[in-house]
Amino acid sequence: QEEINRRIALSDEIQKKLDETAEYVDWESSQAEMAHEELARKAQLVTRAEEELADATKEAEEAQARADQEGTAEAKDAAAAAHAKVATAKGLVADAKTAVEQARVAAEDQARSQREAEASAIAERYAQQEAHSENLQGVNPIPPEEMITTAAVNVRNGPGLGYVKTGELEANAKVTVNGEAYGFYRLTDGSFVSTQYLSSPSEAPTKPVKVTEEKSEYTWQTYVANIDHQAAVDKCAGGLTYSPDVSTYLGKDYYPIHNHCSGQPILSLVKGNTVEIKDLGVFVVVDTRDITKGDKAGVLQGMEGTILLQTCHNSGDGMRVVGLVRA
């Protein structure tokens, strides 16, 4: 429980950092948006100033024409006033264009700050995802021990079927383990293998274990498809996905089936049924619980089983969770 609490606290700290980074990016984005709005406003001022200059120029030309034709002092004064208005309008246009250039530089600077903030956020997100992944592993160190594979088995980069397969070991291969987490042993090279397929040399069978392919022996056979995003795989057989966040919180592997075939076949499972999950083993149903969409993971505390399977819905917003233990 102490280890689970530690990992939950670290996950919360990681999320806090990501939230703070997102807030900073949002602030930079708002500043960039305001800078561009200011640039647009300044550009509108230039347009209006140029229109006023055009009007003043036309008015001055007409006043000068009258002055030339009439030659009166009044006409000459009107022409002089019109020319002065033109000079003022030219000054306003120059000032407006200077303001536009300043606003353009400010907008470019703010846009650059926004890009830098977004790039920093991406780097921070990758860093926190890496920390989150290490946190999820929660490997318990054990004294180095030589073991042997009892059958051909996949090698993964983390303790769970949701982690990437990095290789494969043949049956009777000798390895040394130095850690354990969630039903997986950590090898000395940092990779992971399911504990189901490792045994001490003295206990290992002389021949590889043959895994039966006859589905009639099990209520349901399935496999783990991917990590935390829906994929319509395995159709009604229901390819499971692995949820690392819920698994960390509950201290046991948590696999949603999503919405395949209206939640079947998890809805059909009852206590005593057997389930084979490829590369993980054969399990027996020991507990079931109905929950509601939107419930927090805490409602599943106390469920029996080392593995929990969840269907997306039962009826309406209802969901069904099934607890399994190794057969």
Image (cartoon, rainbow, N blue to C red):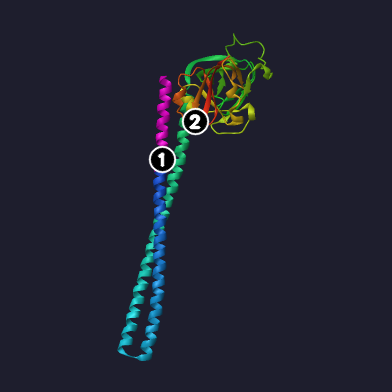
In percent of width and height, residue 79 lies at: 34, 83
Query: Left or right: 271 with respect to 16?
Result: right
> For mark 2, what is the residue?
293
Most extreme residue toward the front, as rendered?
316
**Of circles 1 and 2, which is in front?**
2
Q: Earlier in the sequence, mark 1 or mark 2?
A: 1
Q: Amino acid at mark 2?
A: Lys
In percent of width and height, residue 200 lies at: 57, 11
Q: Amino acid at mark 1?
A: Thr
Tally of numbered discs: 2
Does the magenta stretch mainly form a helix, a strand or a loop? helix
Q: Which residues are magenta?
A: 1-23
* Most foreground residue, 195 or 257: 257
In percent of width and height, residue 43 lies at: 41, 63
Residue 129, magenta (yes or no): no
> For mark 1, what is the residue?
21
Q: Examine the image and state in which quarter residue 298 appears.
A: top left
The answer to whether residue 234 is above or below residue 272 is: below
Most extreme residue toward the top, as rendered?
202
- Quadrant of the rendering where the N terminus is positioned: top left
Q: Examine the image and state in which quarter residue 326 appears.
A: top right
Q: Residue at x 33, y 78 (%)?
A: 84
**Which numbered circle lies on residue 164?**
none
